[in-house]
Amino acid sequence: GAGVSQTPSNKVTEKGKYVELRCDPISGHTALYWYRQSLGQGPEFLIYFQGTGAADDSGLPNDRFFAVRPEGSVSTLKIQRTERGDSAVYLCASSLTGGSTEAFFGQGTRLTVV
Amino acid sequence: KNEVEQSPQNLTAQEGEFITINCSYSVGISALHWLQQHPGGGIVSLFMLSSGKKKHGRLIATINIQEKHSSLHITASHPRDSAVYICAVKRPPLVFGKGTRLSVIA
């Protein structure tokens, strides 16, 4: 597609439920990043994929969070046993490579855990 | 200490003023981004820099690699420039500053 697409744009879920957030990067972009942005804060890094593999997952807060990118294109961020503190905007970005190439951002998924 | 520090955190300016937002970082990077985020909106990349200076319309971004410092300047500011401006360094991945909230008053 023309840009980075994230679905859904909004997700409301009950505490304890499982959610999946999807990111469609720009076609051909090998690097894909997931970030989380809480209200009034800058984005926090979660995980970075280069191709199909997670090059850096040091930002995942705990083992309830997991992300995959099985074919090196679409990525899914999975959150198990959601907690109210998981409420945030989850941002995805992609770039042509992982080096000094420009990153392009999706509009984000606003997750609200009630 | 954050790897990326921005100043000021909040800035209010009168329309027409020249604005400067600063970013300092403490890690080795491959590039630095200046990003714009409107309330409730997505993030838009304004500039990506690895050296020198870039200009786009009323926006100018500079970077000094040796001093690990970058500035974003807005000339002849306008109320529509009101947004959060975020500095992010690419290691990779992108590491973000906390942003500068700019309000331009007519």
Image (spheres, helix red, strand yellow):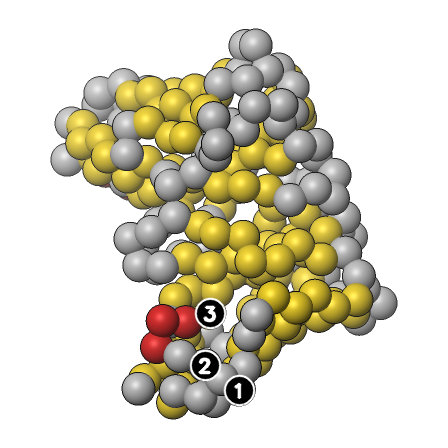
Can you say which quadrant of the picture contains the C terminus of chain B? bottom left
Q: Residues within 10 Å of mark 2 (few under 14, many from 20)?
A: many
Q: CA distance from mark 2 to mark 3?
A: 15 Å
The residue where tag 2 is placed is: B77
Up-down: is A34 above or below B59?
Answer: above
Q: CA distance from mark 1 to mark 2?
A: 6 Å
Up-down: is A108 above or below A67?
Answer: below
Instruction: State left or right for residue A102 relative to residue B75.
Output: right
- First in residue order: circle 2 vs circle 3: 2
Instruction: State left or right for residue A49 relative to residue B79.
Output: right
Q: CA distance from mark 3 to mark 1?
A: 15 Å
Residue A91 at what x, y percent from top left? 43, 39
The amino acid on which the numbered mark 2 sits, given as a three-letter code, is Ser
Q: Nearer the viewer, mark 3 or mark 1?
A: 1
The answer to whether residue B27 is seen in the rendering is no
Looking at the image, the residue that sits furthest to the right is B66
- First in residue order: circle 3 vs circle 1: 1
Q: Residues within 10 Å of mark 3 (few under 14, many from 20)?
A: many
State the residue in front, B86 or A80: B86
Can you say which quadrant of the picture contains the N terminus of chain B? bottom right
The amino acid on which the numbered mark 1 sits, given as a three-letter code, is Phe
Residue A1 at what x, y percent from top left? 47, 26
The residue where tag 3 is placed is: B100
Instruction: State left or right for residue A82 relative to residue B8.
Output: left
Give me the residue at 48% from left, 32% from top: A2
